[in-house]
Image (cartoon, grey):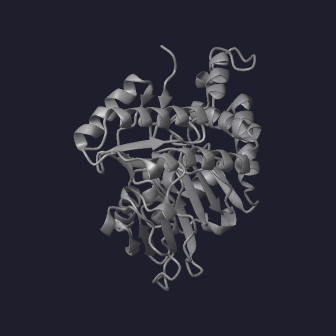
Amino acid sequence: MSRVYNFSAGPAVLPEEVLREAAEEMLDYRGCGMSVMEISHRSSVFDQIIGEAEADLRELLAVPSNYKVLFLQGGAYTQFAAVPMNLMKNKVADYIVTGQWAKKAWKEAARYGKAKCIASSEDRTFSYIPDCSDLPVSPDADYVYICENNTIYGTKFKTLPDTKGKDLVADVSSCFLSEPVDVKRYGVMFGGAQKNIGPAGVVVAIIREDLIREDVLPGTPTMLMYKTQADAGSLFNTPPVYGIYICGKVFKWLKAQGGLVAMKKRNEEKAGLLYDFLDQSRLFQGTVEKKDRSLMNVPFVTGNKEVDALFVREAESAGLVNLKGHRSVGGMRASIYNAMPRAGVEALVDFMGDFEERHPVS
């Protein structure tokens, strides 16, 4: 069977070049006689793999020297607890709730201190980003938290919130490395790899050094202390070796594509193709306010659940897979991450046009 166009929100499409290179190295990584899945995380071979991965990531994002780069485990969900455990010195934090993942993070933080929702878009099914230019930030807040790109609902912060001097913590799982960012504007940014940079099992966290400290909340597990992981160079225990190896290859692939400036241009062009079609379509409609549209996740509907289901089935038969929307919103969702080629989006738009002709609006 030939490869399909995979529009999954995660685990998601990876660059074909990366997969082919990994396949070639599967049984013998660079003459060591072993697969990367078999090597010790304490070996010089893996030391080079993780060292190059960090160096390439720092180059891509221009990470300042006073930030640590950590390769962690437990999914981004574990960071919902790790963030307050490590940062809630005053036991106060403010959350901007723009989707299910931000909401889950807010609820998790409430287990460890006073977590205040200072802005939300839940009133309109998270279809927009609220105005964050003058937020009621708590005077004693330890940080302000956002989920920067909302995978389920297809919204994206185009302008970071005014945190009034408080540290910004951002879950960037589904927009990580999709465009240049100013790392200095964040206290902490973290993302699960399985959406845009690698296989499931790795979380990349970039943390300003002054936020890595010993005075964490009592009862914080050793594994969830940022200082534990930073002091050990992400090797406190056995890390997800193969996942980090693939992430490192994706970082090199991104550099070869021209870096994040080039990637943003490509992503804007791909998303533009799909959004332009949706804006003129008689059958399909986007569900997000135009000003807040994500470049990575594009939800859309026909307004008829039976037609939506038929579209998903027929699209899969045409090699366009994983277009079913999240169970909480229904409809369809096309995740068009960095590794989704323009040809995949063109094929989707062509199929949508054909489907529309065969199913005219009554």
Q: Is residue 206 toward the left or the right of residue 5 in the image? A: right
Where does residue 320 sit, x and y in percent of width and height?
A: 44, 29
Where does residue 33 sit, x and y in percent of width and height?
A: 69, 14
Image quarter of the C terminus: top left
Observer-nearest of 149 and 336 = 336
The residue positioned 54% from the left and 55% from the top of the image is 172
Observer-nearest of 22 and 38 = 22
Q: Compared to 271, does 42 lie above or below? A: above
| Residue 241 in sight here | no
User: Which quadrant of the structure image shows residue 354?
Assistant: top left
Q: Is residue 348 toward the left or the right of residue 23 in the image? A: left
Q: Compared to 17, does 293 lie above or below? A: below
Question: Number of marks in the image?
Answer: 0
Where does residue 287 sit, x and y in percent of width and height?
A: 38, 55
The residue positioned 55% from the left and 42% from the top of the image is 337
Q: Furthest-bottom residue in view?
A: 139
Where does residue 271 sit, x and y in percent of width and height?
A: 55, 47
Observer-nearest of 295 and 216 = 295
| Residue 307 in sight here | yes
The residue positioned 48% from the left and 81% from the top of the image is 135
